[in-house]
Image (cartoon, helix red, strand yellow):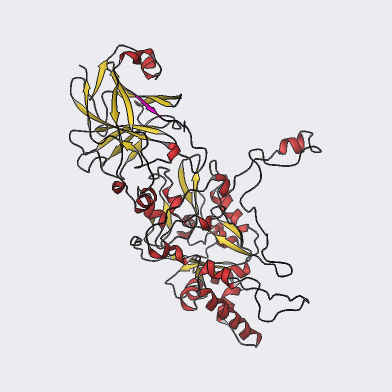
Amino acid sequence: MAPEPPKVKRQLAAVFDMNKCLGCQTCTIACKTLWTDEEGMEYMWWNIVSTMPGKGTPRDWQDLGGGFPNGGDPKPSRIPTVKEYGEAWEFNYEDVFYGGKGMTQHLQPKTSEADWGAQWDEDEASGDYPNSYFFYLQMICMHCTNPACLAACPRQAIYKRVDDGIVLIDEERCNGYRFCMEACPYKRIYFNHDKKVSQKCILCYPRIEEGVAPACFRQCPGRVRFLGFLDDEDSAVHKLVNKWKVALPLHPEYGTQPNVFYVPPLSPPMFDDDGDVIEGSERIPRTYLESLFGSDVHRVLDTLKAEMEKTRSGEKSEILDTLIAREWKHMFGGFTKDPATLGRPA
Amino acid sequence: MVKAQRVTAGDAEMLDPASPEWNGVRASQLTLQPTPITAQPSQYIQEKWKETPYGLARSVAVRAAHNGERLYFHLAWTDDTNDAGIHDTDQFADAAAILFPVNGDAPLQSMGSPQAPVNAWYWRPDLEAPLSVTAQGTGTTRRTQDPELSASGMHDRGEWRVVIRRRLESPTADYVSIVPGVPSKVGFALWQGANQERGGLKAASLDWEPLEIEA
């Protein structure tokens, strides 16, 4: 059986609207420059946006196990290699640009063969033209209600904050055993090769404590990311997850009760052999979406389509208005303070 | 039984695992056992390792010596692979530790208890210096730097040879103090990095080994 989840007073949660994501990775870079630009962290992407269907980051993470499948015992897994996460290559810039070899050598990684990397399959579509399709999956630490990483750690180095449910690794306690990296079914934990400790998304808790939304939320040009306490009835997150139930956890069968919820992607229609639109068809196979979000995905997609139909006939849709997010301050459950107003460490 | 002979050699010679000084010190061949699966501190570890062998280094040759100032342990064990560093996320380094009760009757299997702490000297080839580890029960280990601890190791022809040494006396009550002529106790543990052994996944002494320090 899965262990009892740690008790918290409140849980911060996120909703990512997959229909609005441009795949621009501004979130990824916002996180990278803020948190993982030090030595030993080169290959880390605490936030990553993967093209789906695809292998994801680290490669094939969905096939690796971990978690508490259907609430059962912890499922053994393994630690992905640096290559599977995606090596932070050093390129032969000197040779190509300054060493006079620009006509004989192409730009390439110095350290290993370039046959896989983070985002290797970015924007690679599935299906056959003209009915090909892909969509973006935004990944951070899920700050699970029942974190498998926390349960796996033999040193209680991982804890869930009582006041907001953020899951953190105490680097003072961490001995670098990396059981957490195995146990996390979403494979969102990295190993710092310099400090020899495990590290992951911290939901920008120092910003949260000052009333500022995390960098990846705040910097998203597509207004994809919503933040709020699950029990805050005024927050968009509460409404999307609990009231309208149009945001779903990724792989709920992993059993860790993740606190990042996704508005699943709608599809354009398919074309028939004559190039005519097949009315009512969907390019992204429902079976595939069901494999990601469970059978609830049908209800959610049908709800979204019905809401869109409503607006087409001139009615108002509170769900769509919320998702469109004309006013960004409505997206962050009160965490709207301007980070530029914060003091800087000396 | 491990007997620390009194020697007159200097620190540099004794710290060298290949030094001829060690030829004159008698070795005790000690048996190690994998820590029981039921003692592994998380359900994940138990599920993952219940059918996978660990604690593969089942025997260690221990030599001990002191020069009145410092105590030296020379450990030698078979290990086909030299895992001296962590070069990938799924790699682990070989390691060795020498465990002492800080005072009297600490339980060995549970790494001490709240009343009876233990102190280990933990060596790993990728660390700049060995660490002093204190514990008061499973999962409570705390690693600290002890400037008096030093070590050197070499891997040659499928064998690790490692010398770990410390001053006999400890200035702090958290660490074990060793007095020539006063019998003490010691335990040993080895980790095989190539088998992803770390933390409680190790081969260790089943019980304390008497430690005699020649007066």
Residue at the (62%, 49%) spot, across then down? A117
Q: Percent x, y for residue B140?
A: 30, 44
User: What residue is shown at x 42% (from left), y 72% (from top)?
Assistant: A231
The x and y percentages for residue B143 are 35, 37
Q: Is residue B215 above or below residue A308?
A: above
Tell me the quarter of the picture where residue B57 sits: top left
Whether residue B158 is visible here, answered yes or no, is yes
Q: Is A97 placed above or below B176 here?
A: below
Q: Is residue A33 left or right of residue B203?
A: right
Q: Nearer the viewer, residue A159 or B210?
A: B210
Q: Quadrant of residue B107?
A: top left
Residue A182 falls left or right of residue B147: right
A265 in the magenta segment: no
From which residue to which does the magenta span run? B74-87
Left or right: A145, with A281 as reference point: left
B1 and A221: which is toward the camera: B1
- Up/down of B100 relative to A310, above or below: above
Q: Is residue A226 visible?
A: no
Q: A256 or A46: which is nearer to us?
A: A256
Q: Is residue B80 magenta?
A: yes
Residue drawn at x 43%, y 43% as measured from the top left: A176
For the N terminus of chain B, the image quarter is: top left
Along the line of sight, which residue is nearer the eye, B169 or A207? B169
Majority secondary structure in the magenta region: loop
